[in-house]
Image (cartoon, rainbow, N blue to C red):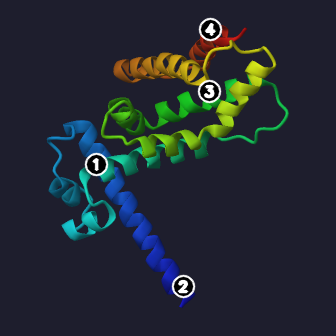
Amino acid sequence: MEYSFQGYYLCVVDKKEQIIKAAMLLLIENGVQATPMSAIAKAANAGMGTIYNYFPTKEDLINAIYIYIKLDEIKAISAPFTNESVKKHFDHFYRSMVTYMVENPQHFRFMDQFHSSPIITAATRSEGAEAFASYTNVLKRGQEQDIIKDISIEEIMQFINGGLMGFIRWLLATDRPLTPAMLDNQLRIAWDAIKE
């Protein structure tokens, strides 16, 4: 009995993820208005009933994709936050984040397109932010130690993310490979901008 339940659970998870991935690609290529749920069902090889069972509306599906990417991203860039320096944590986090986005261009393109969209609910944004709470705590620790400028953490993150997202956008648009030297340059620029 346990085995059959596990098989059913894996099938459900796989189908949900299949829908999320198919929808992500269609939404990136066609936009929200030109991506009907029927097209998503076809691309995911799923029935309309299955789609609506998981995602009652297209907006629910878009919010689920947002969280899917945020959780996948934090898994890829997480590190145990021990007693290492604030600078090392900063470097690890953003080095991993840029690498993740360059290696997952569809995830980057979805987030680039939808991050500021009103379709993403406040609850979804809050859940996405919670996934990165350990990193924001590192920035706060940096401020307490007078290492990082005394500016709101949200402002600091908007500034850094804006610059690095622009860098990733440039890499993908020009089909340039990410080199260690380029990444070192970007992280040095970002760190120099926020350090006290």
**Residue that carries the numbered disc 2 in the rendered image:** 3
User: Which of label 2 and label 4 is nearer to you?
Assistant: 4
The location of residue 124, given as percent across then percent down, is 44, 45
Judge whether 117 appears above or below 63 on screen: above
Q: Earlier in the sequence, mark 4 or mark 1?
A: 1
Distance from the alpha carbon under mark 1 to that under mark 3: 31 Å
**Is label 2 in contact with label 4 (beta carbons under 8 Å)?**
no
User: Badge 3, how many Cα within 10 Å: few under 14, some, many 20+?
Assistant: some
* 159 sits left or right of 45 in the view: right
**Residue that carries the numbered disc 4 in the rendered image:** 193
User: Badge 4, how many Cα within 10 Å: few under 14, some, many 20+?
Assistant: some
Q: Earlier in the sequence, mark 1 or mark 3?
A: 1
Q: Amino acid at mark 2?
A: Tyr
**Residue that carries the numbered disc 3 in the rendered image:** 95
The location of residue 69, given as percent across then percent down, is 46, 44
Numbered circle sitting on residue 59: 1
Q: Earlier in the sequence, mark 4 or mark 3?
A: 3
User: Badge 2, how many Cα within 10 Å: few under 14, some, many 20+?
Assistant: few
User: Which of label 4 and label 3 is nearer to you?
Assistant: 4
